[in-house]
Image (cartoon, helix red, strand yellow):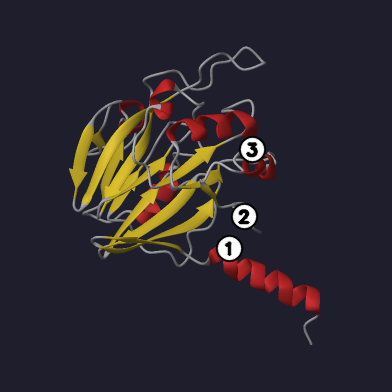
Amino acid sequence: MKTLASLVLSAIALFAAAPEEFSTSAGTLQIIIIQHASLLIKAGGKVLYVDPAQGSYDGLPQADYILITDIHGDHMAPAVVDKLKKASTQIVAPKAVAEKFPGALVMANGDTKTIGEFKIDAIPMYNLKPAADGQVYHEKGRGNGYVVTYGGKRFYFAGDTEGTPEMRALKNIDVAFIPMNLPYTMTPQAAAEAVRAFHPRVVYPYHYRGQDTAIFAKALEGSGIDVRLRDWYAK
């Protein structure tokens, strides 16, 4: 017989695996959390992955589109991409990533492309200053965050970045995914400050390994922003 504790854990696991659903003028868009910065979008009968790199992909569908933000192994994993892609899969990536994937669609910071029913805007992602160890982990111009527009809704996947002027200047973002981990991106407090500046309707902290996302949520209390905490590291 299952104990109460095991039933509770099972319920939490099911909740974590449930798709996040959003209504758009083109129908429902689903986002399935995978792990860390990796997620899956389903909309209009198409499958779009963002940074498929970490977590398990067993049982998940092959990709129509794959967006990759940067060269680091928690965002770019050629073996995972090979598992998910089919002959018609379109990979979208910055130049430093696209070099690893012949035929990839290259997007530089500021570019806009349309793939199927998705409009993609490439947003600069970078560190504002060296980390405490003196390293600049993400120099400006190398990687892309992405704003994906589908059915009139705008979804922002920030990638590895601090709260840059370009992030703060974003407009009309419906759903944002924002990183917070040191020394690579920023603290939960800094992330909350940046989010207040561009004020998405909904925000999910992701790419937060080792950080307390409750600090981020508390810092946004009273802002009117819907903060949604999910477990991106479920076992």
Could you tell me if the residues under marks 2 and 3 are in contact, i.e. CB atoms within 8 Å?
A: no
> Which amino acid, mark 3?
Ala
Q: Secondary structure at mark 3?
A: helix
Q: Secondary structure at mark 1?
A: helix
Residue displayed at 27% across by 26% down: 110
Lower sequence index among marks 2 and 3: 3
- Picture quadrant of residue 51: top left
Disc 2 versus disc 3: distance between alpha carbons? 19 Å
Give the residue number, with chain letter if any, for mark 2.
231
Lower sequence index among marks 1 and 2: 1
- Picture quadrant of residue 113: top left
Give the residue number, with chain letter if any, for mark 1.
16
Numbered tag placed on residue 206 in the rendering: none
Disc 1 versus disc 2: distance between alpha carbons? 6 Å
Residue 220 lies, in percent from the top left, at 59, 40
Instruction: Judge from the rendering whether residue 17 lies leftward or rightward of residue 113; answer left or right.
Output: right
> Which amino acid, mark 1?
Ala
Above or below, 19 against 181 in this view is below
> Which amino acid, mark 2?
Asp
Residue displayed at 62% across by 54% down: 231
Give the residue number, with chain letter if any, for mark 3.
219
- Asked whether 101 or 19 is in front, the reply is 19
Could you tell me if the residues under marks 1 and 2 are in contact, i.e. CB atoms within 8 Å?
A: yes
Residue 70 lies, in percent from the top left, at 42, 32
Disc 1 versus disc 3: distance between alpha carbons? 23 Å
Could you tell me if the residues under marks 1 and 3 are in contact, i.e. CB atoms within 8 Å?
A: no
- The mark closer to the camera, 1 or 3, is 3
Lower sequence index among marks 1 and 3: 1
- Point out the image quarter for the N terminus: bottom right
